[in-house]
Amino acid sequence: MTLDHGILGVVERQVRTWSSGDAEVYAAAAGGPSPAFAIPVLQHGGPQLGLTGADMTQVLHAEQSLWLHRRFPTEGSTVVTKKVEHIYDKGSGALVVSTWESEYASTRSSCFVKGEGGFGGERGEKREFAVPTSRPETVFFQTTEDQALRYRETGDVNPMHHDEEFARRAGFARPVLHGLCTLGITVAGLDFTELHARFTAPVTPGDELRIERWPTGEFRTVANGRQVLLGTVRFSEVDGR
């Protein structure tokens, strides 16, 4: 299987409708309510959808960004425009960057497709993430064995998070937690207007998360002694905030 580069520049539009029940399902699966609920609403089905031709066992969610244009409602309907913006050549793989735009929010996902590099394309810029040297606020969150199954109810049905055989073919001992679930847990309770995050290692359902957050917006999450997530939020006011 080979990634189809013909997806570059392709634009798709659809109407997304969600209910307060959907918001409750997200909050229950991701540690509480958060503006990050906009991400699974806009990119319903998961960031990996649309990677035509790719071997999905070789696809990893690398980065995620979110910009809130106005307060995201717990229920509503909006037109979402999706576009594959870039396919970067990272040598060992291809990095596919896709965006989803709506009147309420915009989100961007970067997916790394292992083994699809070396095609001579642009390498692309790398966003730098860092955390302050000051002491963070630290909280802990105990994920459950069924955490991925609960997050799956938000619409992300990637088999890497629930199918044992698929996860093994992807190189994991068993299904791993959605990166977006770890991200949701990490930023739960924060009322931000912009978010950027990089996923650096997998989380297994049942792991305890050590979440470090700084008042300047930076955050880091650790599981089993290694960093799994790094990022920042911005608390600036925007339209109606």
Image (cartoon, rainbow, N blue to C red):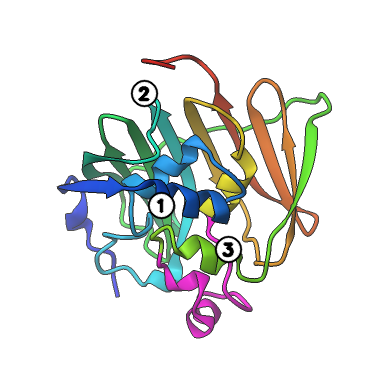
Asked whether residue 125 is drawn in magenta, I would say no
Q: From mark 2 to mark 1, how far is it between C-alphas?
A: 19 Å
Which residue is most to the right?
135
Query: Which residue corresponds to the image point at 33% horizontal and 49% vertical from the top-left?
Result: 43
Q: Of marks 2 and 3, which one's residue comes earlier in the chain?
A: 2
- Give the label, 2 or 3, closer to the camera: 2
Residue at position x 55%, y 81% from top? 168
CA neighbours of label 1 inside 10 A, class few (<14), some (14 to 19), many (20+): some
Give the image location of residue 126, x and y in percent: 49, 36
- The part of the chain drawn in magenta is 157-179
Q: Which mark is residue 177?
A: 3
Cβ–Cβ under 8 Å for marks 1 and 3? no
Q: Amino acid at mark 3?
A: Leu
Q: Circle 3 — which element?
A: loop
The residue at the far bottom in this view is 165
User: Mark 3, residues whose alpha carbon is within 10 Å: few (<14), some, or many (≥20)?
Assistant: many
Mark-to-mark CA distance, 2 and 3 = 29 Å
Secondary structure at badge 1 equals helix
Tell me where residue 221 sits by quadrant. top right
* Residue type (three-letter) at the residue carrying disc 1: Asp
Total labels: the figure holds 3
Front residue of this view, candidates 19 and 148: 19
Image vertical order of residue 131 relative to residue 75, above or below: above
* Circle nearer the N terminus (1, 3): 1
2 or 1: mark nearer the eye: 1
Q: Which residue in the protein does label 2 denote? A: 70
* Quadrant holding the N terminus: bottom left
Give residue 22's mark: 1
Label 2 is placed on what type of residue?
Answer: Arg
